[in-house]
Structures are given as structure tokens and as C-alpha cells.
Image: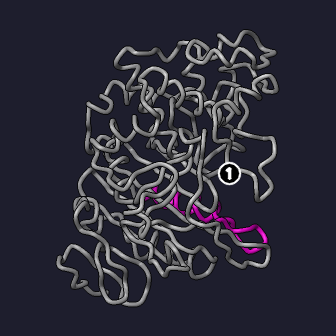
Amino acid sequence: MRIADCGTNFFRRRAYRRSIFYHGKCGVRPRYSLSNIDFNLLLFRTFTTMKPENTLNNLLRDAVEKHGIAGGGLLLFKNGQTGTLLAEGFADREKRLAAGPDSIWHWASVTKTFTSVAILRLASQQRLKADEPLIQYIPELAEVYNPYGPMEAITIRHALSHTSGFRNPTWPWGGSEPWHPFEPTRWEQLVAMMPYTRIHFEPGSRYGYSNPAFIFLGLIIERITGDKFESHISDHIFAPLGMSSAYFDYTPEHLQPLRANSYYTDDKGTLHAHGPEFNTGITVANGGMNASLTDLGKWVRFLSGAEPNPDILDQAGLQEMFKPVISIPESGRTASPDVPEEVTCGLFRFIYGDRVFFGHTGEQKGFRVFVVFDPAEKSGAAFAFNTALSVASGPTTETLRAGIFGEVLKLL
């Protein structure tokens, strides 16, 4: 290990491995802009409880070199002050684009954390109440079949906490053909299927992950504010946090050189590319966001209290977001089967020993991601892989992600 000559001695890297602790060009690595980097997040110091080369670094390297992950990265900070950024492999193998701090990953359902904060922000402004019925803002829901009672009983809080009774998938009708849209692109398509939609359990009685519920929340944001969902999040979250790489769906031209591709393996272990671009359509509020690890670090620092911003959401609003709503059975745990979970209004609450963490996972195309943080310690992490491994080719990406998640909890 040596200190890289990259214009600053904050960065270090391996001369051979594709494991990086830096931001810049050294040797054959691609060049990244230094203009918008948060050096607080990249300053590398070894924590007393942390040996990154022997733990997380090894797990990331093994995922790439032994198991076939194309690339991935992890940003971790502790006590609100210092941080480590690790990356392995390629963001885009075909372009030989190494994974790095500015590589743009797709964050899938981590998008829901932004939607939730936007809803709670409107609640803090008294523009809505969490216990108001969804149907008050979306009268089209009157066509849904609810064998458990009136649709007026399903609230915004139920939608935020995945206790509404709506199904999991957005569009269970087709989608398997290559010519099908990735997701429905228009609200009218969902409205047309409302008479064919049912509530699957009594609202509030149990946990049942629902993507459509977050489409409804995104629509509420639009109907209350008059903004497009994407513009509202950009103006009221991305811009105040300086998340200059964050956007929804198709990549702007100036960011395309940094866009990570998405991969999957077949039953023989052969790697195939999905292609970097896809349109989440009407589902954008539940899974349409893309950004670099550096920028996701800014988001996690905000959520953890390391860098509060009451203009986005004040402490009272965050505390509302942290309140547990209902326990999740082991079979439904999102991050690791070994870590007990509860769902909150927009997050998952992870109970690890005597500590409590919050976070969210995401899965879409080949991307497998998570964010996790401990507001008591102002510590947190953001993680991304860009490959979905088949069961036949070895451990799944979800298994590898769970191992890294568990190690992150130990180190935070």
C-alpha cells in the first residue's frame, strides 16, 4: 500500500487491486472531477474498531474476483466526522470504467426514503396529515376492492409504513416480454386497473411491502405542491444537500461518462449487461433515483444527524420517521435474516445488540444497494453492487450484500 500522488495526500489506493480510497487519476484509472467532492467523506483514517483491508475490503474484493460481481462500492463514516470510501471492479465493464466515488449507481427502493422525507416535510408544514386517508388526495382509489372495509380507512401513514394492504408489485400484468415497457409510464394505466386491484389484508394489521403505495405518495406530493415529483425532490432535497450527481431515470448527457451499467449472470455464470439506462415511469417515486456514492453519503449524513438541515426536515420530523410501526417477520426481513427489523414511516429499523440502526435496501435490474445509519452515533454507510448473480452460479448478490451489511453494523 502506498499513498497515491493525486494532488492530495488524503487519498490512498492499491497499486494492483481495484480497491480505492481516493478521488482522482492514478496510473490507468479514469479521471474524476474534484469540483464537487466532500473531502470530509473521503478522508481516510483507520478507526480503532475498523480494519477495512481485512473486513469490508476483502468482502468487496471477493465479491468481484471470486463470485462475479462486475463492480461495487461502499461509503462509510463514523461519529459524523471521518469516512472511508471503498470500491472494487467496474462500474461499466464494456467501457472499462472503474468503480469509484463518482460512479453513478441506481438506488432503486432507497428512493422511497426521499419520498418519505418529502411527505413528512409537507406534514411539518401542515399541508397534510399522516393519518388522513389516501383517498382524500387520490379519489381514483375508490375503485379498489377492499374486503376489509372502506378505502377511507387506509391512511398516508399506512402507505409510508407498508401496512396499507396494497400488493407488492406495481404491475403484475405482463412485463416479461422484451418489448414490454420496464414499468407503466402513465398514471392512467394504473387507474384503468383499479377495478382489478384489491386490498390483501386489513390495513394496519401487519407488514406487507408495497411499491404502489409509494406511487400514491409521489402523486400526493404532486397534487399538493403542483410540482412534478422529480422537480420537487431536486429542488427541496438534492439542491440543498449539494447532490449534484442525483437525478431520476435517464442520465443527463454531462453525467453519462460516470453512469454504472447493470449486469446479471445466467445459470452458467456468464455475465450479461442489461444496459445502463431504463425508465421507471410512473414508479419513479418508489425506485427511480440515480446518484454517486459521494452524494448518497450526503443524504445519509443528513438522515443520521451528522449534517442536519431543518429546511429539508427538522428534528421533530425525523423523529416521526424513526418511530417503529410494526415488527417484520423473519421471512420478510429486507437486509439480513439475522438482524431483527421493524418498519417505520419510510425506513426500516434494525436492532443489532443494544444498538438501533435505520436504513433501506433496494433491488432493480442488476443493482443491489442499501443505506444504513445510527442517529445516536451520527454514523452511517451507503453501498452498491451492479450485478444480480443467479443461484446456479454461486451465492446470490443478496447473500453477499447481507454479509457486507452485517459487517457494516459491526464497524459503525
**Residue 348 in view in this figure:** no
Check the picture and name the quadrant holding the N terminus. bottom left
Image coords of residue 403 (percent x, y): 57, 62
**Image position, residue 144 (x, y; %):** 75, 20
The secondary element bearing badge 1 is classed as loop
Taken as a whole, is the magenta stretch helix, strand or loop? helix
Asked if residue 333 lies left or right of residue 173, the reply is left
Left or right of 150? Residue 370 is left
5 over 10 or under it: above or below: below
**Residue lying at 55% horizontally and 26% vertically, measured from the top left:** 325
Question: Looking at the picture, does residue 155 appear above or below residue 211?
Answer: above
In-image side of 191 versus 224 (left or right): right
Task: Tell me what residue is drawn at x 62 percent, y 30 percent.
Answer: 213
**Which residue has dot 1 on it?**
182
403 within the magenta span: yes
Q: Residue at x 69, y 21 (%)?
A: 205
Which residue is found at the position 74% from the left and 74% from the top?
Answer: 393
Image spot of residue 8 (x, y percent): 17, 76
Residue 299, x across and y down, in percent: 36, 47
Classed neighbour count for the residue bearing mark 1: other residues with Cα under 10 Å, few (<14), some (14–19), many (≥20) = some
Of 236 and 181, nearer the camera is 181
- The answer to whether any part of residue 382 appears in the image is yes
**Is residue 354 or residue 311 the one in the foreground?**
311
- Residue 102 within the magenta-colored segment of the rendering: no
Read off the magenta span. Answer: 388-410
Residue 52 position by quadrant: bottom left
Q: Which of 408 and 124 is in front in this view?
A: 124
The image quadrant where one finds the C terminus is bottom left
